């Protein structure tokens, strides 16, 4: 019979991922070694390799695990059947809360996804597209005329322009935490969204706009 996993196996994996994400975020994926990850976790290299076969496996697990959580929480909010404004506010609140506890993983996602092999990168981007689609759906529910003018996704990407880079300046022990900032982001975005007017027919957005991911890279320009 196959031997079962020891108690705490999954907890140890999560600890390793957290340590690796912190190192990748601070030093960059290429400059970080498995030996440094092992030292940061207080493990031997042999023990580390018992959980992850190599550094690349860590990168895939960090990036995919983070974006999969984002995809899941967006689906959960959409399934609640909230009114349009409440739905968009809930999405912003949940995303900001997730970012608050995953700043290192989010930095890895935004900066190191380019090191993923094509199949792994496409899988990660698939989750990102689902996140964008969920937010765009919420924007369209609040401003259907913007959706009709092909502006729901561009508006969504403007929102992620605020959200995705909060990790560069929000300090965990600062005067403003993520719980305080989330409603501010929602107020700022919703106030601006309600003021946006669709361009005239035949304007710059009359043609099909490019598709975007949550990392802000037009798909037409992706490798």
Image (tube, rainbow, N blue to C red):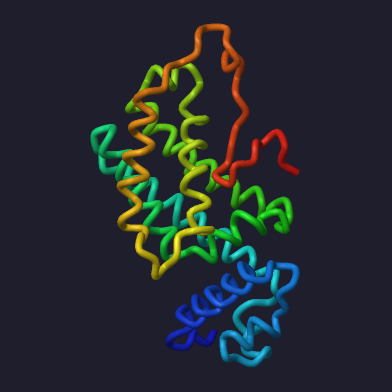
- State whether residue 34 is above or below residue 127: below
Q: What residue appears at the point 42 percent right and 39 percent down from the top-left corner?
A: 134
* Total labels drawn: 0
**Left or right for 30, reference 219:** right
Image point (54%, 66%), residue name: 104
- Residue 86 left/right relative to 103: left
Left or right placement of residue 151 versus residue 82 in this view? right
| Relative height, residue 61 to residue 165 (above, below) | below
Q: Position of residue 126 (x, y in %)?
A: 57, 45
| Rendered image quadrant of residue 213 | top right
Point out residue 80 in the picture as x, y percentages from the top left corner.
26, 43
**Residue 150 percent coordinates (x, y):** 51, 21
The quadrant of the picture occupied by the C terminus is: top right
Q: Seen in the image, is 18 located left or right of residue 138?
A: right
Residue pictured at 45% horizontal, 16% vertical: 198
Q: Quadrant of residue 105?
A: bottom right
What residue lies at 63% left-to-right and 86% top-to-bottom?
38
Residue 166 or 76: which is nearer the viewer?
166
Please identify the residue farthest to the front as the structure is shown: 175
Residue 184 percent location from the top left of the image? 33, 46
Q: Is residue 47 above or below residue 99?
A: below
């Amino acid at each position: 019979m196959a031997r079962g996993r020891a108690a705490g196996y999954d907890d140890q994996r999560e600890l390793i991922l957290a340590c690796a994400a912190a190192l990748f975020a601070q030093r960059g994926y290429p400059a970080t070694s498995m030996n440094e990850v092992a030292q940061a976790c207080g493990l031997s290299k042999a023990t580390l390799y018992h959980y992850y076969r190599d550094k690349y496996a860590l990168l895939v697990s960090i990036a995919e695990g983070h974006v999969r959580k984002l995809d899941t929480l967006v689906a959960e909010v959409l399934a609640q059947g909230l009114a349009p404004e409440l739905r968009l506010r809930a999405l912003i609140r949940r995303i900001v809360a997730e970012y608050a506890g995953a700043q290192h993983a989010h930095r890895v996602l935004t900066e190191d996804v380019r090191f993923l092999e094509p199949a792994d990168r496409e899988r990660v981007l698939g989750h990102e597209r689902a996140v964008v689609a969920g937010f765009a759906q919420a924007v369209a529910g609040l401003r259907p005329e913007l959706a009709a003018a092909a502006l729901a996704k561009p508006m969504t990407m403007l929102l992620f322009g605020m959200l995705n880079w909060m990790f560069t300046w929000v300090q965990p022990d600062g005067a403003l935490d993520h719980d305080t900032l989330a409603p501010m982001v929602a107020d700022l975005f919703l106030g601006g969204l309600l003021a946006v007017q669709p361009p005239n027919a035949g304007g710059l957005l009359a043609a099909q706009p490019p598709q975007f991911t949550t990392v802000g890279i037009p798909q037409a320009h992706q490798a």
